[in-house]
Amino acid sequence: MSSFFTSRLFFISLALVVIAATLPLYVSGYVLGLLTVAFYFGVFAMAWDLLFGFAGEVNFGPTFLIGVGAYTAGILNAQFGWSVYPCIVLGALASVIAGLVLALPALRVRGPYFGLTTLVAVLMLQNFIVVFADLTGGEIGLTIPDVITINAGANYWIALGFMTVSAAILYGLSQSPIGLVLQASGQDPVQAGALGFNIVKHKLAAFVVSAFFSGLSGALLVFYFGTASVGTVVDVAVGVNVIVSAVLGGRRTVLGAALGAIFLIVAGEFLRPTGELATFIVSAVALLVVLFFPGGFLGAALSREARS
């Protein structure tokens, strides 16, 4: 891990963060708003990469954890009048509890069944939101009376700071002994277990960490949007964007997942004038990356640096 602070990746990352921090001084509120959303999606993608890229568990339902955190925070604020920051904290804790409830039985199954379990959890959450519309706002959505701030620059700096801190923690965890055990268990769980590692315990820890950051980011996002709805935080299409972001950026890179999310959000927005063609273009780019650069943007760059 110490070698990271002397690597080219560290200095490039530091330069990008410094440049990004100055953007509110000379770009429009529209661009800041777009990047604010992209930064939160970056945390979604990094949290997903920790579970899939290192632990090897295919989570088809990242929006279950995101949605639990977002709706818990939103409901506490809209229905019970709680202030913003306790709602955000409790939203993250609710995601951790929901993640534990989901992971304990799900991690006992192998192969695609774990992924199917997480996907079913998303569908159940969507159904819960619709059935209990008086509490959740149903298909219309839940209006959040409070927001963190209405200042575009402040919202941007909060999102950037949150993504930067999350990236540092998640990347550090991925390079720690726990991350190495997760990577070993993801590649060959039988051999890793034979070496004496408790595979289920380590994967459960990864799921809890992923749940915490997903729920915390989801709670922050709804207080930025001022609303919570199925289409913004729970829909399967949102989960697909999170997965594609992580794959585009590079599996097992963590930091690449954030880059992939920023690229996906920004590219989709700038291609919006093309209508339905925008989705086709972004999907085509994602497919080409998967086929020709399996390591993603950052993975390909790191491989090239290692060869040189």
Image (cartoon, rainbow, N blue to C red):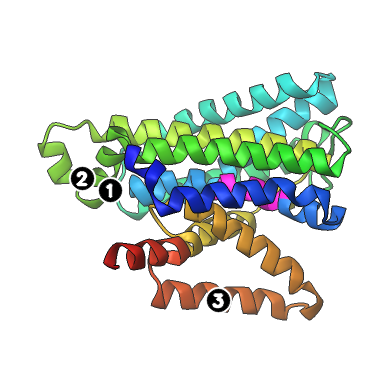
Q: Which residue is mark 3?
A: 285
Q: Are marks 2 and 1 in contact (CB under 8 Å)?
A: yes
* Vertical comparison of 36 with 293: above or below: above
Does residue 210 appear left or right of residue 73 in this picture?
left
3 vs 1, front mark: 3
Furthest-left residue in view? 194
Does residue 132 appear left or right of residue 112 in this picture?
right
Image quarter hosting the N terminus: top left
Q: Is residue 40 magenta?
A: yes
Q: Are marks 2 and 3 in contact (CB under 8 Å)?
A: no
Start and end of the magenta stretch? 36-45
Image quarter hosting the C terminus: bottom left
In the image, what residue type sits under mark 2?
Pro
The spot of residue 17 in percent (x, y) is 61, 47
Residue at (81, 31) in percent of width and height: 148
Q: Is residue 166 magenta?
A: no
Depth order, front residue of 79/308: 308
Earlier-in-chain disc, 2 versus 3: 2
Q: Which residue is mark 2?
A: 189
* Residue 186, label in figure: 1
Query: Crowdedness of circle 2 by 10 Å Cα count: few (<14), some, many (20+)?
Result: many
Residue at (57, 44) in percent of width and height: 43
Query: Crowdedness of circle 3 by 10 Å Cα count: few (<14), some, many (20+)?
Result: some
Query: Could you tell me which secondary element the residue under label 2 belongs to?
Result: helix
Q: CA distance from mark 2 to mark 1?
A: 6 Å
Query: Crowdedness of circle 1 by 10 Å Cα count: few (<14), some, many (20+)?
Result: many
Q: Magenta segment, principal secondary structure?
A: helix
The spot of residue 127 in percent (x, y) is 66, 44
Q: CA distance from mark 3 to mark 1?
A: 27 Å
The spot of residue 175 in percent (x, y) is 34, 40
In the image, what residue type sits under mark 1?
Gly
